[in-house]
Amino acid sequence: VGTAFRQGAVRVTQLDIRPQPPEKEDKLSVWPYWATKMRTSSSQAEGAEREFQVATLEFIGEDGALTGVKCCEVDEKRKPIAGTEFVIRADLAFIA
C-alpha cells in the first residue's frame, strides 16, 4: 500500500473478503491465535481506502489495459449478495 503511494498512486483501495474486524480484541478468545481486531498500518494511514466483505468478480480492460475491477458485497459466509455489484476504476491491481 505504501509503496503504491510512493510510486505516485493517486488512490489506493484495499479489498478484503473478510468482515471488518472489531476495534478492540476479545481478550477471552485470543490465545493461542493472533488477536482479531482492526489494525491500521502506517502505509494504510497514508490514505488507503479499505473495503471489507467485498469479493472481486472480474478485471475489466480495454485495448489490453486494465480500466476497472468489478466487485460485489459478500455475506458472512463469503457468498455474493445479489444486486451489490460495483466497479472500482483502476489502472493497476495487486493481488496478495
Image: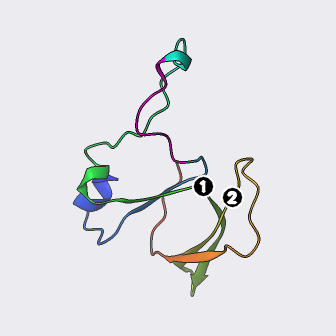
Query: Residue 63 versus residue 18: which sits nearer the camera?
Result: 18
Left or right: 72 as drawn, with respect to 51: right
Residue extending farthest to the top is 32
Looking at the rendered structure, the number of numbered marks drawn on it comes to 2
Q: Contact (CB < 8 A) between labels 1 and 2? A: yes
Residue name at image x 56 percent, y 19 percent: 29
Position above or below: 95 against 60: above
Answer with mark 1 or mark 2, whichever residue precedes in sequence.
Answer: 1
Tell me where the magenta segment starts and ends, as one range: 20-27
Left or right: 87 as drawn, with respect to 94: right
Query: Residue 66 versus residue 71: which sits nearer the camera?
Result: 71
- The amino acid at mark 1 is Gln
Give the residue at mark 1: 53
Q: What secondary structure predominates along the stretch shown in magenta?
A: loop
Q: Is residue 95 magenta?
A: no
Position above or below: 48 against 72: above
Q: Is residue 24 magenta?
A: yes
Position above or below: 18 against 85: above
* Residue 88, image x, y percentages: 51, 75
- The amino acid at mark 2 is Val
* Residue 23, image x, y percentages: 41, 39
Give the residue at mark 2: 74
Residue name at image x 33 percent, y 43 percent: 40
Determine which quarter of the picture holds residue 25.
Answer: top left
* Residue 51, image x, y percentages: 49, 59
